[in-house]
Image (spheres, coloured by chain):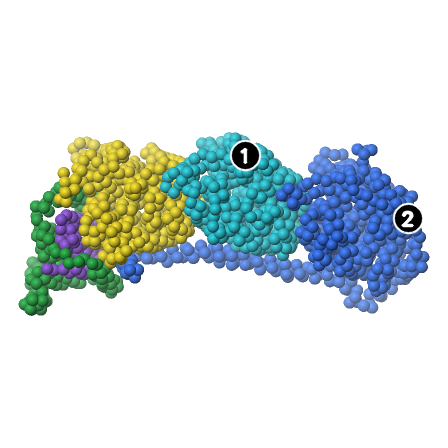
């Protein structure tokens, strides 16, 4: 059987990949994708814990389902905002969306 | 709008090239894993796990590293499918299904649309921010810390259990009925959000103004 | 009150002028003649009351035995902390010393006020002038009847205030304003010592009551060194007030005030407060001989220095001022020799003849509007009466027998010879001769010889009767007051034992006839002085002018008052104002701009730097968050 | 004093607050109504303060430290608070009564001279009366929460009062003053919190806090916080920086109240919060306080020598005089403390008079530089007489208020540290120097023709000056009523030597 | 009904009446807006409807105040929940009445806006009431999603979109952090139920376990983002500045309060046994937040940005209460939260009305307001002074109580930092007051008046600021009661 730790390590790596994407990318949409990676890592965690440590109530599974749902919704919402920004500024580059500062 | 969509040929090229790369990259991993499996160092589920993990992580790396936006998006598809595979390994077919449907079918398409609609150039190449090296450092450290902390734990060696779908359904729609309602509202909100932003504000106002007058 | 009035009611004496001050100061415009007659009448009343008090005092004074207990019953608590732990009890105390001071103060004051009616006629602030005079008299009387040191200090500062106001009476003149300031600050330095002395004495005895402190000191309840230090501090007050070296510099400048004021305050009364104070504490000073020596030599230095400066001064009032300083020096020499009686006696006579001299010079100034001797001369022809009374005063000052000054100065010289090193006597006698010299010079230059300023001379005229009458009375007193030294006179007046026994009860000093041998030496010195003075300054004073050439440096030294004013001015400018500048700079630059403003600016600058963390870029923000998580996690690992 | 008199104490705070409230309802245009209301209000405050002062019984039979105690529960048995947690509790001791009287006296002329303000008279009075309410509150409240609340209330209006109605560098002065005083509150805040927690009675009642046991270590730690915090308001060196600039830029009435009364709140805080609550800490730190006091006294006096702006000079003079107060407190004996409280009153009166007079002149001349003036006594004799009187009081002339206070402080200092006493006496001579220099320069000598257009100060200013001068002379000549009230309160404080 | 574990489930829907009412009203508003042309209804009906719904919800909350029950082990209805329900409804009511003119002219899609406001209020009250991580998480997202959108609703203001983008992207990252942390807590405890987690953590507190600490770090980070704690605050100033002003107000009020409600629920409940693991984190965050917030606020020129930093600084103060977690500090925090919300709304509504009139939002634009509208200047001044913690205003009282309660928990040093920071804050509040009172107006010096609703809201809020400042007893008692619900005896 696969040990729980394997899943945790995998999710940590996936999370870190996502974080790296958030920190290094300039395109709003790519940042959004990276966030999706982080959320996927979270879902893996929840499911892993549910399967291994909460086999009777498996709330984690439900949680993961909701995480997936919310993540999807978030993509939709964020895309709307990106589109709006693009319409106003002709760019989806987050570095150029920096008129608000200091 | 359609002028900004990538050409089908480009798609083809991408898929073919990507598949080739994937195959070339996966083959050695596959070979090593197969060898390990053969010598009984790993079990069959582990074989699948490692294979899926390798694909998943490689494509995740693609998502965050690819210069070409479309390539990155396609890598995301692979990643999410890999995640679905992991779900399967965790014995939750239902969630794997949801993952494939929601992500593979919905989110990625949405993202692709978004990409195309927001990319003014024909050449969808993106540049990364100047803090990339630091980002790499931080991400690496975070991964290290997370892994260290996760492994620090005394999890014991629990066995994964199969959760029957009916039980899951009961749990979801009976015990967690309220969250289901809430999440419905949430989706509604998200829809509203997408709607109000994607629609032209002036158009909306104009419509309202006409309605009022 | 009349029948009962006595020593218990002595508080009434200062109260009358105090009330007059309030009335005159506040209601001045409403009173006819601005209240000058009220002041004069009030003072006359006080003089009368003084005699009543003296009669009462004489009645309890039997054959040198004086029992003041029960006769000084007036007292009340001004301050009382901790049920009597710390009290300031206002009380009056009357003894022989008071009995000398009271008539001096009140009589001279009365004379001066009457004289002023003529002298100050037509001045602006005429009423205010009399009001302040009343304030002065009130404070001075409080000073001499005070039974308590705080009360004494109160009065001490009160006379200082009056002096300040009167020196600065012509405040439109910058010089008058400066002189008033100088007088106040200089005496204030002395007062610092006085207050410290008072507090030190309280610290040792727990009381401010003068008699209590004297008792304690006599009973050796206070350590000798402590007592010495305390008494020296106390003496500092006297040095300031009585214009002794090195704080004498204010008195010549104080001549900026109206001349009658100089007569009253800066000759007869206030400046002798220091003498009074030391005399009052003489039983204590008798216990601390070091302090007494300090007094002696301070007096000696002052006497010589002031006399020498009087020799060259060209201002008629300044000469008199130096003379006053010098004579006060004589008194302190006496006190330092332990001759309290002699000191008080000289105080007594000096008050009258010096007041006379000042008022006389006032008449001259009134008539000529000049006070530079270079502009005067030959006035005896125009002002014979003034010249006569002025000469009487001068003879008294010079120490010619019959006149009052002779008797008292003789007493001092006599005591000095007995009680102090012989050198002191020699120097003091020499100073007496100097006195005669500058006195002669003053009289000659003012009243004799040829007029040097014809304009002034032509306008000169004899003063009105209201000014001359006080002069006459003072001239009489300047002549006869010396006779009080004789027991016979005292007995005739109702003071058995005479003034000698009266003043200093414990070692009654009986004086029935002069020591002719000693007196003739002194007289000879004085006559020599007059002779020298005549030789140099009669006529057109050729020798005096020639004499300047002998030792120009010495002359310059004297004219420049031993450069002490310059020295003080230098100290004030360089040291005190320098310190002021330094601290003001420190406060502005270091405390305020660096400390306070700098602190504020640093905070603000921090904000300025920190705000640039807010770059406006999403990846940067996310980076911050990630860093936050990383740091927290790493620290958490470290903690584990 | 009975507890019924507690209503008067309460009224002392509520009348100015109520006046401020009523003023809000009056239209700005109704100047007559504003003047009438403030006249009535200030006078009634004075009468009440005098009543409190007179009614305070010093015969010594009451065991309680405070008289006229009256309490209303505000909040209890909730959260951090236990029984009697926070009460609106009034009561005075002799010190409070004396200082309340001072406030009552100064408020009257401060009101009178402000009537000539043209812009925003109503707003000015609203803020001024809030300030006055704060000051009265501090003197009569015996619950620490409300005490501190009113302490801050007294500071709150200061910024606008100075910045709007002030002169010269008003924005700078106002901001500096406000920030420094608030920074001072940090320390007080901290000390109050610590005290409450340390005592652990769940109440801010001062009587409980005073009586409670506090460890020596606690007291030694937190006394300095109170001393610093309140010391800022008391212009304690080196935290005095706000004082000269603040005073220089404040409008007349604010300078009067601030220098006259508010600075005393600082010293009062050191007494009440510091010495009364933490006597052991006070005893431990008293030498430090006395050193700070003497340094401040000399420092202020010497700086004042070189100041040319009259108000700046008075600002530094205040630093110097407040230095005496701290010397008095640092002596830790009853004489010095009596002197300190007397000095608060004395300085309050004379400095109010100073600022009134300077303001009266500045309103006409818009100049305060001493070298620009000369012979002013000719042009403005009444003004000059009052000014000279104030100067004389300031330099400690006997018969005026300053002397009696200073002499107590000197004596107290001599009891504790003779050297300090000696230096303090010397400082009094320096004080005389700068004041007399100013008088000789500005008031005497030949008239400067530039100022022939100046008029005598207004009738209201004269009246106000008369009130203050009368108070100065009364205190100077007959300090007994004050001392009788102050000393019994001081002797209640544990550890104070006679 | 029982759940899968055999626990009894209380499915009494009436317990959720306020949220249900809010939800229904939201849909009603959207429909009304959608068919406004057909139904011939004007804009005015929308705020009316919204307020009516909110009032109903508020009333329902009060009716349910005495209930001490839970819904399906997901939502607790107790004094704590009620406190926040009432607070959130009240905030929304005040905000809508105070800013409906602004919303009409400066906000896109007012109907949707009102609906979002209603739904987010419901979300916020679920955050306060949740007793299961899942409910809490979804509630957080409901509130966050609504706010992402609300921020983006600024009309003709490009800053609005940018602000929304920053908020939504960083919010996603923060959500990921939070969820990752939650997953570990879930992993450690094996349950998402607060009570079960508390039991699980309570068993073994001696051993420091990496996975627990990791979970805590990430939860702190995630909620730190929602609460704007340094260094997770960086979205705050930008979002505040870019958002329409009522949204800014809402962000600084309801969003913040809801986050603290959640923090209190978690740190006083399931996570309390692990206090030694998280206490220092909160302390560090609190210190950094107070210091940075106040320092940077000194340099701001835009009133919204200034208020953003000011609210960051306030978060620092509130976090202190979590450090020394006890019923006393929780009570102190609730008191301060109440006072802060009232004060903050006062200021924001004043700013909204100022903007309605002038269309300006730089601090220097407030020049001479004391002349052109002395009433509004007074309201602003009172509000700012209250924020600075000046006496006779509610800010003084609540801050005093909060700080005292933290000292009571032996964190004197933290309070000292807080008081210093609070003093610095006075400086920048005074800068605004200075503009209003010291200078002449730049433009038209004519006097102007507020709208009637403007007078109503500012008047009521000002009265609350003053009255609670002078007599804060009821607030404290209610807060204390609510805090007691967190710590069942």
Across the whole image, how many numbered discs are drawn on residues? 2
Quadrant of res C409: bottom right
Q: Residue at x 92, y 47 (%)?
A: C488
Which residue is tagged 2?
A: C487
Secondary-structure class at tag 2: helix
Q: Which chain is blue?
A: C
Q: Give the Cα separation between the discs numbered 2 and 1.
A: 67 Å
Left or right: residue C219 compared with residue E271: right
Q: Colour of chain B?
A: green
Q: Are marks 2 and 1 in contact (CB under 8 Å)?
A: no
- Of residues C387 and D128, the one nearer the viewer is D128
Chain E color in figure:
yellow
Disc 1 crowd, CA 10 A, few/some/many (<14, 14-19, 20+): many
Say whether residue B187 is visible. Answer: yes
The residue positioned farthest toward the left in the image shown: B38
> Is C609 displayed left or right of C450 in the figure?
left
Q: Which chain is purple?
A: A
Estimate the x, y position of residue E310 in percent, counting from the top left.
Answer: 36, 48
Determine the image quadrant of residue C424: bottom right
Residue C72 picture quarter: top right
Q: Which residue is mark 1?
A: D45
Q: Is residue B53 left or right of residue D92?
A: left
Residue D291 screen position, x and y as percent: 57, 55
Of residues C441 and C227, the one drawn nearer to the viewer in this rendering: C227
Let me know if marks 2 and 1 both belong to one chain.
no
Query: What is the letter of the cyan chain?
Result: D
Q: Is C199 located above or below residue C70 in the figure? A: below
Q: Position of residue D313 (x, y in %)?
A: 58, 51
Residue appearing at x 25%, y 57% in the figure: E209
């Amino acid at each position: 059987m696969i040990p729980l730790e394997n899943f945790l390590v995998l999710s940590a790596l996936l999370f870190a990949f996502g974080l790296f994407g958030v920190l290094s990318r300039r395109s709003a949409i790519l940042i959004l994708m990276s966030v999706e990676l982080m959320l996927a890592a979270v879902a893996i965690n929840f499911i892993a814990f549910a399967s291994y440590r909460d086999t009777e109530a498996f709330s984690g599974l439900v949680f993961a389902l909701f995480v997936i749902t919310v993540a999807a919704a978030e993509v939709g919402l964020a895309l709307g905002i990106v589109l709006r920004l693009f319409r106003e500024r002709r760019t989806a580059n987050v570095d150029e969306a920096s008129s608000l500062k200091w | 709008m359609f002028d900004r969509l990538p050409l089908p040929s480009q798609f083809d090229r991408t898929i073919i090239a990507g598949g080739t790369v994937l195959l070339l990259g996966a083959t050695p991993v596959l070979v090593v894993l197969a060898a390990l499996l053969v010598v009984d160092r790993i079990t069959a589920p582990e074989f699948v796990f490692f294979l899926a993990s390798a694909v998943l992580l490689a494509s995740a790396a693609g998502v965050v590293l690819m210069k070409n936006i479309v390539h990155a998006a396609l890598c995301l598809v692979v990643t999410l499918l890999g995640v679905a595979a992991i779900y399967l390994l965790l014995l939750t077919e239902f969630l794997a299904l949801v993952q494939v449907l929601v992500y593979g079918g919905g989110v990625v398409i949405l993202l692709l649309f978004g990409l195309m609609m927001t990319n003014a150039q024909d050449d969808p190449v993106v540049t990364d921010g100047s803090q990339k090296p630091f980002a790499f450092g931080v991400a690496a450290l975070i991964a290290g810390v997370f892994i260290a902390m996760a492994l620090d734990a005394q999890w014991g060696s629990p066995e994964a259990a199969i959760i029957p779908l009916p039980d899951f359904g009961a749990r979801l729609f009976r015990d967690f009925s309220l969250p289901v309602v809430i999440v419905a509202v949430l989706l509604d909100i998200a829809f509203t959000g997408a709607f109000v932003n994607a629609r032209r504000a002036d158009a909306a106002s104009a419509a309202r103004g006409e309605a009022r007058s | 009150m009349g029948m009962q009035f006595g020593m218990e009611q002595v508080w009434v004496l200062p109260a009358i002028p105090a009330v007059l001050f309030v009335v005159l100061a506040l209601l001045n415009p409403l009173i006819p003649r601005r209240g000058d007659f009220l002041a004069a009448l009030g003072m006359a009343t006080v003089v009368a009351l003084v005699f009543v008090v003296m009669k009462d005092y004489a009645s309890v004074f039997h054959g040198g035995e004086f029992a003041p207990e029960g006769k000084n019953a007036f007292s009340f608590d001004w301050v009382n902390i901790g049920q009597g732990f710390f009290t300031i009890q206002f009380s009056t105390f009357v003894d022989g010393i008071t009995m000398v001071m009271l008539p001096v103060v009140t009589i001279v004051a009365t004379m001066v006020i009457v004289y002023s009616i003529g002298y100050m006629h037509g001045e602006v602030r005429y009423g205010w002038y009399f009001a302040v005079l009343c304030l002065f008299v009130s404070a001075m009387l409080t000073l001499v009847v005070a039974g308590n040191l705080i009360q004494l200090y109160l009065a001490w500062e009160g006379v200082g205030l009056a002096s300040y106001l009167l020196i600065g009476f012509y405040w439109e003149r910058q010089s008058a304003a400066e002189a008033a300031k100088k007088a106040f600050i200089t005496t204030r330095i002395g007062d610092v010592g006085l207050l410290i002395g008072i507090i030190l004495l309280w610290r040792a005895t727990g009381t401010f009551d003068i008699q209590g402190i004297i008792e304690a000191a006599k009973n050796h309840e206070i350590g000798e060194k402590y007592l010495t230090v305390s008494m020296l501090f106390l003496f500092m007050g006297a040095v300031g007030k009585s214009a002794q070296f090195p704080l004498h510099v204010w008195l010549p400048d104080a001549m900026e005030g109206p001349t009658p004021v100089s007569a009253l305050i800066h000759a007869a009364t206030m400046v002798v407060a220091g003498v009074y104070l030391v005399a009052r504490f003489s039983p204590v000073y008798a216990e601390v001989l070091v302090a007494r020596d300090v007094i002696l030599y301070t007096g000696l230095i002052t006497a010589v220095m002031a006399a020498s400066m009087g020799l060259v001064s060209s201002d008629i009032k300044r000469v008199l001022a130096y003379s006053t300083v010098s004579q006060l020096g004589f008194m302190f020499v006496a006190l330092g020799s332990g001759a309290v009686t002699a000191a008080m006696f000289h105080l007594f006579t000096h008050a009258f003849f010096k007041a006379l001299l000042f008022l006389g010079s006032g008449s001259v100034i009134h008539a000529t509007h000049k006070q530079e001797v270079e502009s005067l001369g030959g006035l005896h022809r125009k002002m014979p009466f003034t010249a006569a009374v002025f000469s009487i005063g001068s003879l008294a000052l010079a120490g010619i027998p019959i006149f009052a000054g002779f008797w008292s100065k003789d007493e001092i010289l006599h005591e000095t010879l007995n009680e102090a090193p012989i050198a002191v006597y020699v120097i003091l006698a020499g100073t007496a001769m100097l006195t005669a010299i500058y006195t002669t010079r003053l009289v000659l230059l003012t009243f004799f010889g040829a007029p040097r300023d014809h304009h002034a001379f032509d306008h000169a005229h004899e003063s009105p009767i209201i000014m001359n009458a006080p002069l006459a009375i003072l001239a009489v007193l300047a002549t006869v007051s010396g006779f009080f030294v004789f027991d016979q006179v005292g007995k005739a007046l109702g003071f058995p034992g005479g003034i000698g026994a009266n003043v200093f009860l414990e070692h009654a000093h009986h004086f029935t006839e002069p020591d002719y041998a000693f007196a003739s030496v002194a007289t000879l010195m004085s006559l020599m002085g007059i002779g020298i003075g005549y030789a140099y300054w009669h006529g057109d004073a050729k020798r005096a002018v020639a004499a300047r050439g002998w030792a120009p440096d010495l002359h310059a030294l004297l004219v420049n008052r031993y450069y002490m004013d310059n020295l003080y001015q230098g100290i004030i400018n360089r040291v005190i104002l320098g310190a002021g500048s330094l601290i003001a700079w420190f406060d502005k630059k270091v405390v305020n701009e660096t400390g306070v403003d700098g602190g504020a600016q640093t905070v603000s600058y921090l904000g300025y730097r920190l705000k640039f963390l807010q770059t406006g870029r999403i990846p940067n923000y996310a980076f911050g968050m990630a860093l936050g998580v990383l740091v927290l996690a790493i620290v958490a690992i470290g903690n584990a | 004093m009975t507890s019924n008199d507690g209503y008067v104490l309460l009224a002392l705070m509520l009348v100015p607050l109520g006046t401020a409230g009523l003023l809000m309802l009056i239209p700005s245009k109704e100047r007559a109504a504003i003047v009438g209301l403030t006249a009535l209000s200030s006078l009634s405050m004075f009468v009440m303060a005098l009543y409190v002062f007179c009614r305070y019984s010093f015969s010594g039979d009451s065991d309680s430290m405070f008289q006229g105690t009256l309490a209303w529960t505000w909040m209890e048995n909730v959260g951090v608070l236990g029984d009697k947690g926070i009460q609106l509790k009034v009561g005075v001791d002799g010190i409070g009564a004396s200082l309340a009287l001072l406030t009552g006296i100064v408020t009257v002329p401060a009101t009178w001279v402000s009537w000539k303000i043209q812009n925003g008279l109503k707003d000015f009075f609203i803020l001024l009366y809030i300030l006055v309410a704060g000051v009265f509150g501090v003197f009569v409240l015996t619950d620490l929460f409300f005490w501190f609340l009113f302490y801050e209330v007294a500071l709150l209006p200061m910024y606008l009062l100075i910045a709007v109605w002030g002169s010269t560098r008003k924005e700078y002065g106002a901001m500096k003053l406000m920030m420094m005083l608030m920074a001072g509150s940090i320390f007080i805040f901290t000390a109050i919190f610590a005290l409450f927690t340390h005592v652990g009675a769940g109440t801010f009642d001062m009587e409980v806090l005073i009586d409670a046991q506090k460890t020596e270590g606690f007291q030694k730690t937190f006394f300095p916080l109170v001393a610093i915090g309140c010391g800022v308001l008391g212009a304690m060196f080196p935290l005095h920086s706000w004082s000269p600039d603040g005073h220089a830029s404040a409008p007349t009435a604010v300078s009067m109240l601030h220098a006259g009364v508010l600075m005393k709140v600082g010293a009062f805080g050191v007494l009440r919060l510091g010495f009364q609550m933490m006597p052991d800490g006070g005893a431990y730190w008293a030498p430090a306080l006395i050193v700070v006091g003497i340094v401040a006294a000399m420092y202020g006096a010497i700086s004042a020598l070189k100041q040319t702006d009259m108000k700046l000079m008075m600002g530094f003079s205040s630093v110097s005089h407040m230095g005496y107060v701290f010397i008095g407190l640092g002596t830790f004996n009853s004489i010095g403390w009596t002197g300190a409280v007397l000095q608060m009153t004395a300085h309050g009166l004379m400095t109010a008079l100073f600022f009134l007079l300077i303001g009266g002149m500045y309103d006409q001349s818009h100049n305060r530089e001493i070298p620009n003036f000369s012979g002013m006594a000719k042009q403005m004799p009444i003004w000059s007489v009052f000014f000279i009187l104030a100067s004389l009081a300031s330099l400690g002339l006997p018969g005026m208020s300053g002397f009696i206070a200073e002499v107590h402080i000197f004596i107290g200092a001599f009891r504790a540290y003779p050297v300090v006493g000696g230096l303090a006496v010397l400082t009094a001579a320096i004080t005389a120097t700068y004041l007399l220099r100013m008088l000789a320069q500005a008031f005497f000598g030949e008239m400067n023709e530039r100022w022939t257009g100046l008029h005598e100060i207004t009738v209201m200013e004269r009246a106000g000056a008369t009130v203050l001068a009368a108070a100065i002379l009364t205190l100077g000549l007959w300090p007994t009523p004050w001392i009788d009230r102050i000393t019994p309160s001081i002797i209640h404080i544990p550890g104070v030597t006679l | 009904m029982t759940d899968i574990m055999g626990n009894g489930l209380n499915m009494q829907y009436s317990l959720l009446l306020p949220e249900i009412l809010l939800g229904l009203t939201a849909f009603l508003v959207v429909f009304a807006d959608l068919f406004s042309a057909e139904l011939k209804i004007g804009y005015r009906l929308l705020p009316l409807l919204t307020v009516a719904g909110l009032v109903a919800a508020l009333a329902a909350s009060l009716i349910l105040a005495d209930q001490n029950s839970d819904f399906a082990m997901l939502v607790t209805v107790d004094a704590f929940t009620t406190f926040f329900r009432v607070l959130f409804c009240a905030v929304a009511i005040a905000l809508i009445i105070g800013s409906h003119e602004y919303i009409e002219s400066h906000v896109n899609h007012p109907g949707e806006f009102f609906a979002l406001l209603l739904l987010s209020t419901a979300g916020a009250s679920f955050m306060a009431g949740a007793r299961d991580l899942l409910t809490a998480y979804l509630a957080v997202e409901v509130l966050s999603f609504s706010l992402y959108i609300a921020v983006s609703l600024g009309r003709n203001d490009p800053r609005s979109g940018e602000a929304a983008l920053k908020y939504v992207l960083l919010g996603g990252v923060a959500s990921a952090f939070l969820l990752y942390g939650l997953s570990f807590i879930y992993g450690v405890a094996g349950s998402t139920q607060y009570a079960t987690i508390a039991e699980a953590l309570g068993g073994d507190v001696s051993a420091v376990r990496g996975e627990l600490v990791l979970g805590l770090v990430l939860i702190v980070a995630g909620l730190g983002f929602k609460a704007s704690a340094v260094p997770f605050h960086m979205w705050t100033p930008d979002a505040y500045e870019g958002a329409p002003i009522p949204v800014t107000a809402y962000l600084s009020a309801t969003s913040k309060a809801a986050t603290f409600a959640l923090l209190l629920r978690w740190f006083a409940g399931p996570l309390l046994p692990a206090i030694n693991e998280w206490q220092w984190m909160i302390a560090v965050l609190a210190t950094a937040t107070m210091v940075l917030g106040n320092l940077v606020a000194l340099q701001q020129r835009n009133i919204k940005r200034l208020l953003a930093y000011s609210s960051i600084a306030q978060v620092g103060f509130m976090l202190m209460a979590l450090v020394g977690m006890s019923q006393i500090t929780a009570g102190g925090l609730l008191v301060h939260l109440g006072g802060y919300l009232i004060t903050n709304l006062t200021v924001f509504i004043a700013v909204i009305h100022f903007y309605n009139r002038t269309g300006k939002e730089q601090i220097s634009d407030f020049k001479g307001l004391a002349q052109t509208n002395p009433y509004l200047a007074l309201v602003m001044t009172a509000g700012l002074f209250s924020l600075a913690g000046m006496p006779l205003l509610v800010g003084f009282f609540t801050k005093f109580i909060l700080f005292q309660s933290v000292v009571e928990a032996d964190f004197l040093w933290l309070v000292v930092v807080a008081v210093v920071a609070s003093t610095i804050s006075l400086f920048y509040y005074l800068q605004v007051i200075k503009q209003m009172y010291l200078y002449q107006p730049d433009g038209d010096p004519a006097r102007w008046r507020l709208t009637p609703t403007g007078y109503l809201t500012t008047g009521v809020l000002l009265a609350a600021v003053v009255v609670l400042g002078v007599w804060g007893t009821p607030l404290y008692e209610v807060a204390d009661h609510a805090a007691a619900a967190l710590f069942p005896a």
